[in-house]
Image (cartoon, coloured by chain):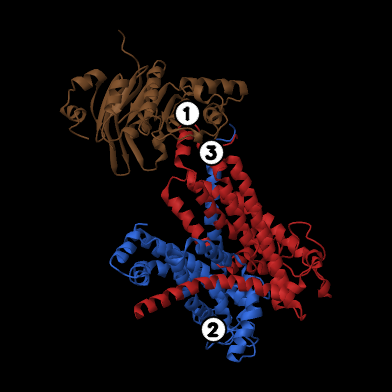
Chain colours: A brown, B blue, C red
């Protein structure tokens, strides 16, 4: 069976915020139509890795990097890269839901409108589509023009996912999408992720080992900015190759 | 898009740099004219005691008398405004009930928004006859009256900055004092005041800068006499007032004109020094408190 | 026993000092009306200034001049100030350029008004040959107002949560699109408040006007930016200090009341405008 294409390839990637060394020579592949979980203790660079992929790290003046990250075999750091296109194709959902202070409709329509969709019917179709894909449509269909800020935490997070889906990304980066949510809301999002992976490459940072086991196909264990182990989720959890991995998984560390 | 992101960024950057250009421009014009003035006037002359630029016999360019006038007004004004402002700040930050605060704080800020010409007018109509009758003078146009109204103008600055400074004292200090059985006043005196000293200094510096730069109110009540002042009850002509009075009479580009700009340069440097000092001290103070 | 007494004394002293601020404010208002109330009338507000017969004189021209200044200063300093604030909070990357600009702003805020007058005289009146005119005064006062607008603008921009910007950028928005669609609309009401407060301070200034423009008496109203103009603060000043008529001082007080009234009205406009903006952006449709 042909191996799946690697949508994102991280090669010898190291990064610093000023003097602080955050990531150290990370080598990873993220595959299409699969969910890859990144696990590891807090502060070890997981979010930074995610944000390096769509170059949100550009926002921090003190950020430096060495090595490369490629999307569809093209480096995201090349000078010819159109950041707008990159971020359209590689969507990022933040740890804390950050809906804009607009209506639900305008939140989801924000991306498409930004990239040129002016036709009202087309926009409405995209909004409905994205909300359905994000498992939120049923709950909000009759109050699309209410403020997004009035939704519950779980609904806001699904709104953010819908917002990201509205620009038709290839890849979805999810930074601890359920960390602020209760178990029921978490379960809904996990189901959503399993459905979304049919059409996207998904990378999910999570603190929750059980969640990683439930949802992901591959798992990468990051410790202090270094990649300790990477492999199929089943084998990483059941027969980890590294002692460090075993320590973390069995709760003896972090 | 015809106009690229890069163009937009440059547009915003240009606007940002404009402020630097304005400051440089102000300094530039002052400096150029001051240099012109010093082709004719020596530094020794400039810091002499008599200012008499229009004399037929021998023009004199000494600003010391004017400087002393500024100093008298400023020192007296701060002697009044600093304690008053500190107490107000202390009251607002530590003693006032929320209801009182709601009335008092806007009142203090409103004083700051009264145009200086209006305060000068009130000083002219009310304060100067008062001072005249209190001290038996023919008119009340002197350094004291000017100092009184400048104190009113500087009060809000000192009050609001010191309120910030006192509020920045960590609660832990205050609670520690109270837990040891200290009374409210003792806590204020022995805990809050001492730990706010450099903040108070910064507030004073800021007040000084503001007082030195005040023009209209002093112009209206300071008396504007050129004689070297000997006390608060003498009429004085502070540097700011002098520029305002004489600038309309001078020929552009003449030595007199340039000398007035040199005076402006002195004012610019003095006020900048006070403001920068206040800023530096305040930053360090707030950092130390971890505020 | 005497401890509690001195404690009470100290606390009373502090309270009294604080309340004196309130007293000062009330005293100013009272005295203004005491001296100027008699001169106030509809005629006073709506008549032109009459040099010969001060009892028939009015400050209409000065009101118009002050309003013209307000509009002009707003039109010049607000776009520049807001753009500068946007640069500082949204674009500036290198710390040294940000620090330099901030340093310049802080120093500009402390420059005495008479020095701004000298600057305006040298640059606008003389070098750019605008003469003592409305335009020269507008430009000079705008330079003065700029630091206040920028500070208020920055504060307002900072209230917009970083999360909004990150959300927009992650969706592929450019920095300008983020500013235009998210940051500016959110911070607009705060910026307008700061701007109008800044302008209302500017129209109370007298010292620069002495050097760059205002006149005490003219025929009719200014017709163009290079014309002479009258202004309320300057008018107050001249009436108070240089007019020989025995009633001049009470007219000065009346003019001062009109000035303060105008400033209050301008501030009142802000609050109304701000209220409307707030209702609009609270999660309603764009």
Distance in Å between CA atoms under marks 3 and 2? 57 Å
The percent position of residue C236, horizontal first and vertical second, equals 70, 71
Q: How many marks?
A: 3
Q: Chain of mark 3?
A: C
Contact? badges 1 and 3 (CB < 8 Å): no
Nearer-the-camera pick, C138 or B30: C138
Q: Quadrant of the C terminus of chain B?
A: bottom left
Q: As displayed, is residue B162 above or below residue A195?
A: below
Q: Residue A159 shows which numbered tag?
A: 1
> Left or right: where does residue C196 sit relative to residue B170?
right
Residue A166 appearing in the image: no
User: What residue occupies the far front of the structure in this picture?
Assistant: C1
The percent position of residue A150, horizontal first and vertical second, equals 50, 35
Q: Residue A149 shows which numbered tag?
A: none
Q: Chain of mark 2?
A: B
Tell if the residue under mark 1 belongs to the same chain as the one under mark 2.
Answer: no
Residue A110 appearing in the image: yes
Residue assigned mark 2: B65
Q: As displayed, is residue B31 above or below residue A180?
A: below
The picture quadrant where one finds residue B235 is: bottom right
Distance in Å between CA atoms under marks 1 and 3? 17 Å
- Residue under the point 51% across and 61% down: B99
> Left or right: where does residue C252 sit relative to residue C161?
right
Q: Chain of mark 1?
A: A
Residue assigned mark 3: C182
Please state which of the two labelled residues, at mark 3 or mark 2, is closer to the viewer: 3
The percent position of residue C110, horizontal first and vertical second, equals 52, 64
The picture quadrant where one finds residue C243 is: bottom right
Disc 1 crowd rating (10 Å Cα; few below 14, some 14-19, many 20+) is many
> Left or right: where does residue A200 sit relative to residue B267?
left
Regarding mark 1 in the picture, which secondary structure is present there? helix
């Amino acid at each position: 069976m042909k191996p799946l294409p690697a949508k994102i390839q991280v090669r010898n990637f190291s990064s610093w915020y000023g003097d602080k060394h955050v990531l150290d020579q990370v080598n990873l592949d993220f595959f299409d139509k699969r969910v890859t979980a990144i696990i590891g203790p807090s502060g070890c660079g997981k979010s930074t890795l995610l944000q390096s992929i769509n170059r949100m790290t550009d926002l921090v003046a003190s950020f430096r990097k060495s090595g490369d990250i490629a999307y569809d075999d093209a480096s995201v750091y090349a000078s010819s890269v159109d950041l707008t296109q990159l971020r359209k194709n590689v969507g990022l959902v933040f740890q804390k839901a950050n809906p804009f202070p607009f209506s639900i409709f305008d939140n989801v329509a924000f991306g498409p409108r930004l990239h040129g969709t002016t036709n009202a019917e087309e926009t409405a179709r995209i909004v409905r589509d994205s909300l359905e894909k994000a498992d939120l449509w049923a709950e909000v269909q009759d109050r699309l023009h209410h403020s997004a800020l009035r939704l519950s935490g779980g609904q806001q997070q699904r709104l953010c996912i819908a917002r990201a889906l509205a620009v038709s990304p290839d890849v979805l980066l999810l930074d601890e999408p359920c960390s602020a949510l209760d178990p029921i809301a978490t379960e809904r999002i996990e189901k959503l992720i399993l459905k979304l992976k049919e059409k996207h490459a998904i990378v999910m940072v999570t603190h929750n080992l059980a969640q990683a086991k439930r949802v992901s196909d591959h798992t990468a264990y990051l410790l202090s900015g270094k990649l300790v182990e990477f492999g199929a989720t089943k084998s990483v959890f059941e027969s980890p190759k590294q002692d460090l991995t075993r320590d973390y998984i069995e709760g003896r560390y972090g | 898009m015809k106009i690229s992101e890069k163009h937009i960024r440059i547009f915003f950057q240009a606007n940002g740099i404009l402020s630097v250009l304005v400051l440089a421009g102000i300094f530039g014009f002052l400096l150029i004219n001051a240099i012109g003035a010093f082709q004719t006037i020596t530094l020794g002359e400039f810091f002499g005691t008599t200012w008499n630029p229009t004399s037929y016999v021998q023009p004199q360019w000494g600003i010391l008398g004017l400087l002393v006038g500024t100093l008298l007004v400023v020192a007296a004004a701060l002697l009044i405004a600093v304690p008053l402002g500190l107490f107000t700040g202390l009251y607002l930050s530590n003693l006032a009930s929320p209801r009182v605060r709601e009335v008092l704080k806007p009142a203090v800020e409103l004083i700051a928004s009264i145009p200086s010409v209006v305060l000068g007018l009130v000083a002219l109509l009310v304060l100067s006859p008062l001072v005249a009758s209190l001290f038996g003078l023919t008119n009340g146009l002197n350094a004291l009256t000017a100092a009184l109204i400048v104190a009113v103008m500087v009060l809000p600055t000192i009050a609001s900055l010191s309120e910030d400074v006192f509020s920045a004292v960590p609660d832990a200090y205050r609670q520690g004092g109270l837990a040891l059985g200290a009374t409210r006043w003792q806590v204020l005196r022995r805990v809050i005041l001492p730990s706010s000293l450099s903040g108070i200094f910064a507030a004073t510096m800021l007040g000084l800068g503001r007082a030195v730069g005040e023009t209209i109110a002093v112009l209206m009540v300071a008396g504007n006499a050129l004689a070297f002042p000997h006390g608060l009850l003498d009429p004085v002509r502070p540097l700011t007032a002098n520029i305002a009075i004489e600038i309309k009479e001078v020929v552009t580009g003449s030595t007199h004109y340039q000398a007035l700009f040199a005076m402006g340069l002195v004012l610019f440097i003095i006020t900048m020094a006070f403001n920068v000092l206040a800023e530096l001290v305040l930053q360090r103070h707030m950092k130390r408190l971890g505020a | 026993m005497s401890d509690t007494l001195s404690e009470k004394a100290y606390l009373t002293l502090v309270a009294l000092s604080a309340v004196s601020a309130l007293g000062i404010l009330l005293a100013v208002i009272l005295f203004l009306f005491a001296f100027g109330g008699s001169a106030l009338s509809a005629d006073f507000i709506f008549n032109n200034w009459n040099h010969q017969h001060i009892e028939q004189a009015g400050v209409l021209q000065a009101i118009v001049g002050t309003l013209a200044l307000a509009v002009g200063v707003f039109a010049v300093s607000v776009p520049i100030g807001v753009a500068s604030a946007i640069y500082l909070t949204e674009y500036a990357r290198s710390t040294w350029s940000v620090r330099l600009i901030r340093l310049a702003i802080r120093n500009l805020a402390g420059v005495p008004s008479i020095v701004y007058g000298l600057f305006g005289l040298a640059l606008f009146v003389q070098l750019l040959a605008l003469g003592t005119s409305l335009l020269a005064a507008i430009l000079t006062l705008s330079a003065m107002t700029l630091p206040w607008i920028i500070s208020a603008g920055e504060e307002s921009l900072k209230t917009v949560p970083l999360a909004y910007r990150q959300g927009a950028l992650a969706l592929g928005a450019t920095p300008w699109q983020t500013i235009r669609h998210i940051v500016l609309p959110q911070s607009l009401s705060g910026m307008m408040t700061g701007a109008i407060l800044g302008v209302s301070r500017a129209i109370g200034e007298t010292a620069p006007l002495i050097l760059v423009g205002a006149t005490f008496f003219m025929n009719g109203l200014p017709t163009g930016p290079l014309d002479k103009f009258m202004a309320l603060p300057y008018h107050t000043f001249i009436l108070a200090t240089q007019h020989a008529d025995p009633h001049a001082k009470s007219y000065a007080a009346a003019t001062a009341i009109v000035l303060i009234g105008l400033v209050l009205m301008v501030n009142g406009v802000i609050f109304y405008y701000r209220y409307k903006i707030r209702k609009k952006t609270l999660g309603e449709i764009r």
